[in-house]
Image: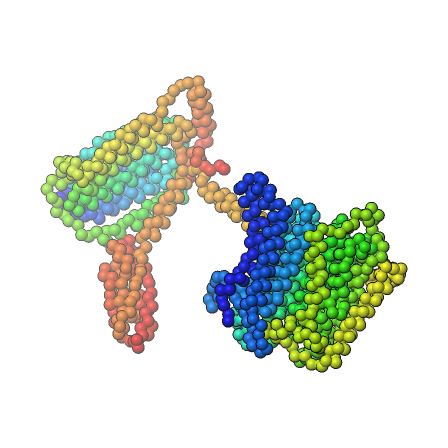
Amino acid sequence: MPEDKYYPLAFVVGLPLLGAILNGFVLDWLGRLLGKKVHKILVSRVVVGTVAVLSVFLSFVVALYAVVWHLPLVKEGEEAPWLSFTLWNWIKVGGLSIDLKLFLDPLSAVMVLVVTGVSSVIHFYSTGYMAHDPSHRRYFAFLNLFVFFMVLLVLGDSLPVMFIGWEGVGLCSYLLIGFWYEDKAKAQAGKKAFVVNRIGDFGFLLGIFLIGTVTGKVDFHGIKENLGMLGSGEVLGISPITLACLLLFLGATGKSAQIPLYIWLPDAMAGPTPVSALIHAATMVTAGVYMIARLNFLYMASPPAMAVVALVGAGTAILAATIGFAQNDIKKVLAYSTISQLGYMFMAVGVGAFAAGIFHLMTHAFFKACLFLGAGCVIHAMHERQDIQEMGGLRKKLPHTHWTFLVSVLAISGAPFFSGFFSKDEILWRAFSANFQYAPWVPKVAWILGVIGAGMTAFYMFRLYFLTFAGKFRGPGELSNKIHEPSYLMIIPIMILGVLAVIGGFVGMPHTFHLFPNYFEHYLEPVLAQMPSQGGTAEEWGVMGLGLGTALLGFSVAWILYGRGPSLAIIKITGTIPKLYKIVAGKFFVDEIYGILVVRPIGWLAAFSHRVVDRFIIDKIMVEGSAWIAGVCGWLLRKVQNGIIHRYAWVMAFGLTVFIYIAARPMPDIDVSVGQDGLVEFSNMHKHAGYLMSWDFDGDGKFEVIWSEKNNFKYKYPKSGKWVAKMRVRSPWGFEREKKINVVIDTKK
Amino acid sequence: MLNEISINHCLILSGILFSIGVAGFLTRRNLIAVLMCIEIMLNSANLLLVSYNRFNPSNHAGQIFALLSIVIAAGEAAIGLVIAINAFRLLGTIRTDEIKEMKDDA
Amino acid sequence: MKLTTIIFYLLSIISVFSALIVVTARSPMRSALGLMFTFLGLAGIYVLLHAHLLAVVQILVYAGGVTVLFAFVILMIRHGEQISYSGPFMPVRVLSVLTVLYLVYLVGPIYLEVQRVKNALPAGFGTARALGESLFSSKHIIAFEAVGILLLVTMVASIALIGRHRKTKENQKEEEKLENRVEKVIPDGGNTDA
């Protein structure tokens, strides 16, 4: 079944790359080559946009073809089907061989379809959104490049290949967040994203190294085979498998914005809105979830790691939701909501519901992208204003936007039969019913937090909706007349996504409804392990009801407080708890805390390195110091040259004397070769004229040979052991020198 | 003709002359005197050459070499004296301990 | 004791003694004279060693030419020597003597090795004819010619280096400066012994 040369995979990966190259370089150069008129056409918005959208859309089509035609559905219990394509052998060191290999199995199929599909929609939207931006070519090049890396990440067959994609999407994220780099704040946001990501990547790399050294394999199939090797032994007091899982999870917290490394995501809203939609809602931030799902066998083998993942996910979900209560920037609210929903996904994989996590990933991509693109329409209409306190009443002015936005808000809040309902509910049910032997309280706690979080989600999302679309327009007067719907280029995509947000959930309907089978789960079954669940249908309905109830509660509170714009009630409430409000609105000052705890010490280290190490030690001591030493030596040597000829003559004579002395010394060089039966041959290789040698072979002090010129002797030693022979050399000048020779005889040889 | 005198005598004589030349070369402070000591040293070397040739008379190489050495030594003495004269004209002195023109003043 | 032996010892004593005069004489003129006697003694020894041509050349060139050359130059450079010359001071003298002895010691024990010598001489050894034949044969002709060229170069060089002492206005000032400098040097007393 596994074919290794499945070419369509190469196209899926290569098409976006081709788009990036074309937009980035080729169109420009080709245009310059062919003349000004052609150049103008080639770099026009139409051509650039078409190239970009087509490259991603075609990639989606090819992927679809590959999945539908060539990836068969399997029955329960069979091995997962997969297709692969090897580019070339990348690294071959010792016993480790890493190929650049792409492979497609049900899990990566889901991912790649979501990525390329949502990307195509957002690319199309971007042609409208960035219509007035002068750097549209750069934008689309980067966006295509991002898709290329993301697809590489998803289709990679081994951890290093995934890491290439991992790093690449981080890079593109930086490039796109700081897209309007002339604004320093925006550039800083990009830098922050990249740096925080890097910290996570450090953990990821360490995880790869650990797995590679212990099992000897870094490709997914190989790790699965050699899983047993990770179970034994201890590294730093923890079993290697848990350590590897935790390290990889650190990378995931960086990439997918969980505690403690989520701080970059809200700042990342400085980038263009389609970028926020694509990268920070639908695709890049989901890479962490995908990674854990891909390594489900690894995590299932390490219960402590799973507990950590679940708790961190649940905690992040709650924390981000609370921060979202008090944000006033439309994009920031959505950013925190993304962090919160990612927390749900991690919670899912943490309790062993990998399929549920991926399902939520998919539905989230739909409705979150729709929300962001809708927000983009709103911002566009509001002429680049983003403060929701200044909005209101946009329902009538932006009808299409309003409708899709409402639908997505309903989806994310878990309104029945919308996509978010099914996915979130699945997660909550699995958390409640997980049979987690290692620490049974963990899934329960996660579940409780999840339920509370669901209520909070409904609240702040509806707060956002009401403040933006309901009530009366609160913004500056002259703006009111200029608000209009954006062009079809931006409307069509949000409508597509809106539809998906509504119906996308039906593929994963839990079987308790007895309507459709859970296609989604069955499709992924061969690939993903599952935590056994306990509990029957009744409990499932109960949990579902509870989730629905909390969501309804959240909606109601939001409706009361914000139904027609900010009511007096909310103003009173925030008035009574000013301090608490400030903390929540200030994002719990996490950024500031990090600044003091982490950034400042690094600043000190940098200042120290610069002032002390670089300027003083290297420049002063090493560079100027060596020059000074050279100067001192020169000064000393200059003292010798005092110009007094007399003195020179004496020095010359002295030197001559030394030379003669050295020349006159005899050189006793002896070669000893031990033959058989204790017969040893001595020879003095330096035959100087007039040398006379005395030999004492047996070390008794009496010289056997006295002052002869012969320099080659054979002597037989009576018995084995260590002997010390002596030789005296005399030069014609009468100087004598002695040399001792150690002879070891081993007659047993 | 020489029976009792062996090469050793000549060698020792040569050695003594050479040593005297070296001693004078190192000690005298008159430049001309230094040059004279150099001549003594050259002559001792010539004596060495000739005496070796006397006792290994297969060819005349020693004497010929000594002849050429005399020529060269004479030429060298001439040049050295010219330099001494120039030094005197320029510096006003020919005492080696007063000529410090080669001092590195940097 | 053969006659040749006595003559040898006599000549060597003359040479050594004259060399000592060269080294220790106060006035350079005396050193020059000692030098001449060294050359003459050495010439005699060459005769004893069957190097006839060489002996004659030694007298002609060294005793006749080089010595005279030295004498001329000494006479030319009288001014620089009007200083009282106290000779090297005691440590230097001791050191010099020690140097000499040491060098003799270094050089001396060669006698250990060279015991194998021949006393038999081929006929015509060291005569001018034999030497001339050797010199102009293909063995040594190149060296001979080279030395001839060297001699030429030396002659030219010495004449070139001596320069011409022109009395121009600038030179006059320089000469006066020189004489002043000499005056200054003279009262020093020459106590800058090495």
From the viewer's perspective, tell me whether residue A137 is left or right of residue A495. Answer: left
Q: x, y percentage for residue C134?
A: 16, 39
Q: Which of A119 and C192 is in front in this view?
A: A119
Q: In this view, does B84 lie above or below A637?
A: above
From the viewer's perspective, tell me whether residue B104 is left or right of residue A460. Answer: left
Q: In this view, does A203 lie above or below A608?
A: below
Residue at the spot 58% in from the left edge and 52% down from the top edge: A20
Q: Nearer the viewer, residue A561 or A440?
A: A561
Q: Which of A397 and C84 is in front in this view?
A: A397
Q: On the rendered image, what quadrant is the C terminus of chain A found in?
A: bottom left
Q: Is residue A90 visible?
A: no
From the viewer's perspective, tell me whether residue A32 is left or right of residue A192. Answer: left
Total number of numbered discs in the rendering:
0
Q: x, y percentage for residue C130?
A: 13, 38
Q: x, y percentage for residue A116?
A: 62, 60
Q: Which residue lies furthest to the left in this view?
A: C123
From the viewer's perspective, tell me whether residue A499 is left or right of residue C192. Answer: right
Residue at the spot 71% in from the left edge and 62% down from the top edge: A499
Q: Which of C177 and C101 is in front in this view?
A: C177
Q: In this view, does A418 lie above or below B93?
A: below
Q: Is residue A426 visible?
A: yes
Residue at the spot 40% in from the left edge and 38% down from the top edge: A645
Residue at the spot 41% in from the left edge and 28% down from the top edge: B90
| Colouring scheme applied when the structure was drawn | rainbow
Q: x, y percentage for residue C36?
A: 26, 33
Residue A12 image-quadrant placement: bottom right
